[in-house]
Amino acid sequence: MSTRRDSVTSVNVGCTRLLVCALALAALGAACDRGTTGTGAAPSPAPQPAPSPSARGAALVPADRDAKVALGVQYKSGAELYAALKARAGGGAPLSLDDMPDWTGFWQRVGPPLFDPAQKPGELTTAKLKPDALADLERRRELSKQGIEYDPLSNCSAPGFPRWLAIPFLREFIVTPAQTYLFSETMNNLRRVYTDGRGHPPAADAYPLHYGDSIGFWTEHTLVIHTSQVRAGVFHRNDPKYSERLDAVEVWNKLDADTIGVDVWVYDPETLVEPWYVRQTYKHVSNQDGALRLNYWYCGENPNNVVSETSEGSSQFGEFTFTKPDKK
Amino acid sequence: MIALGRDHRTAWDLHKDFEKQANGGQRLKGEELPFLREFAPTPGTTHLVNEMVNDIRRVYTDGRGHVPEADRYPLYDGDSIGFWDGKRLVIHTNQLREGQYQRAQPEYGDQVETVEIWEKVAFTFDRPASPPQPAGR
């Protein structure tokens, strides 16, 4: 007789214990320091607090932005960068139920409605674009100045990845040992990152998807993701377009109790001269009484949302009327 | 054993009865929608994910109650709170929009509320160690 039991995915949260330990060590270090100064004894190196799991994992990539840009340029594709990071992390390690990163709660992105929050006002883009992609962006930006623009979101299409990283509204990060769910309230977008060691689907089974296919690994409390198999799309409303040959690497870290950051390298041989590095930041949303809820987003319930693209690239709203209260 | 529903005026009464008995925190819903599902339990929230139209129910098991009366309005998936009774998840849901249980099935109003009890049942395949031998050999 053979018996198969499916494993139950359950998690335990809380790096609180580690945080307390780190704080205790820090306090201990400070106390030792004061002690040696007060007695006039020979100074000895103060014990340093053990770096947090996030900090240890963050060491996977350089801290400096230019160095991160340079790191991306060393590799021809996101797949290569991902493989290099994985090798550097010794293959990564599965999360332990006894030491789970606490990414619970609601989060909101920080920054303007552009894919790169570091883009300066008036700047066309921080991406290094190939000529056709650059010409397309310049054309669309010019039309936008005239009020002519179309955003696929207007018609309830999925924002897709990588735009998922930059869309507004609430987010949730649901961490389980074998899979992490990255949820965005906008259109109920749910990305799944498989961290159980599986690879991408075989090439014969792969086809373009709104959010692509994401696999990843953990190293300490750092999540590294590789995404490929995306549908062609646009990085943001006033941003460049990308092709379905795009692939990307993300390195996620919780920086402090209120901040989660992600380094992103996007590769697209059709539209980008070199990988586009951006950094996204998400801030924790206070919800002390638990009354704030995430609800189902039904984009089609409002007739304003019936929007189609015209031949000139503008938005055509479906027929609807506003009824005055006295004309009910 | 609680007499399911028979002795309870509302699903909330049933939920509270379970809670009392389990000393901890469920809902029953006649969902028979197709496509894939995922269940992602975490200590404070359990996400019940249905592939169809990216439908995700959140069940808060951190001890919070339903949203205050003044903040309530009908929602597609309602508001769900719950508790764990060992490995059983007990859910209470209210604040639903009116709808239908399933295609060609009855409709319900926005006063509907439900209790569910979720439990993972081990999946077992029984197979003989060796093929049965014909009689007489």
Image (tube, grey):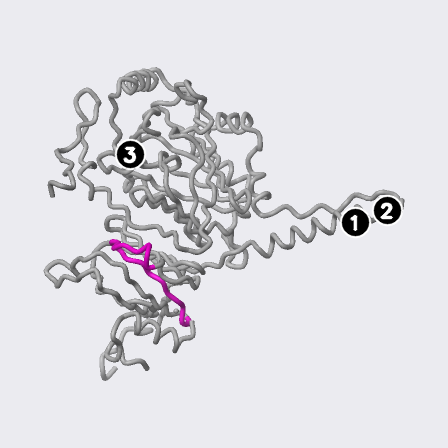
Quick check: do tags 2 and 3 share a chain? yes
Which numbered disc, 2 or 3, marks the residue closer to the eye? Answer: 2
Helix, strand or loop for disc 2? helix
Classify residue A228 by image quadrant.
Answer: top left
Q: Residue at x 39, y 48 (%)?
A: A181
Per the model, the C-alpha gap separating discs 2 and 3 is: 65 Å
Chain letter of disc 1 in the image: A
Magenta residue span: B69-86
Q: Residue at x 20, y 61 (%)?
A: B32
**Number of the label disc, if any, that sits on residue A231:** 3
Q: Residue at x 26, y 29 (%)?
A: A151
Which x, y percent locates residue A324? 15, 38
Which x, y percent locates residue A237? 32, 28
Q: What residue is pinned by disc 1?
A: A32
Q: What residue is pinned by disc 2?
A: A38
Q: Is residue B83 magenta?
A: yes
Quick check: do tags 1 and 2 share a chain? yes
Q: Is residue A306 magenta?
A: no
Which x, y percent locates residue A150? 24, 27
Task: State which tag comes first along the sequence, 3 or 1.
Answer: 1
Q: Count neighbours of disc 2 (C-alpha within 10 A) and say few if under 14, some if 14 to 19, many if 20 or more.
A: few
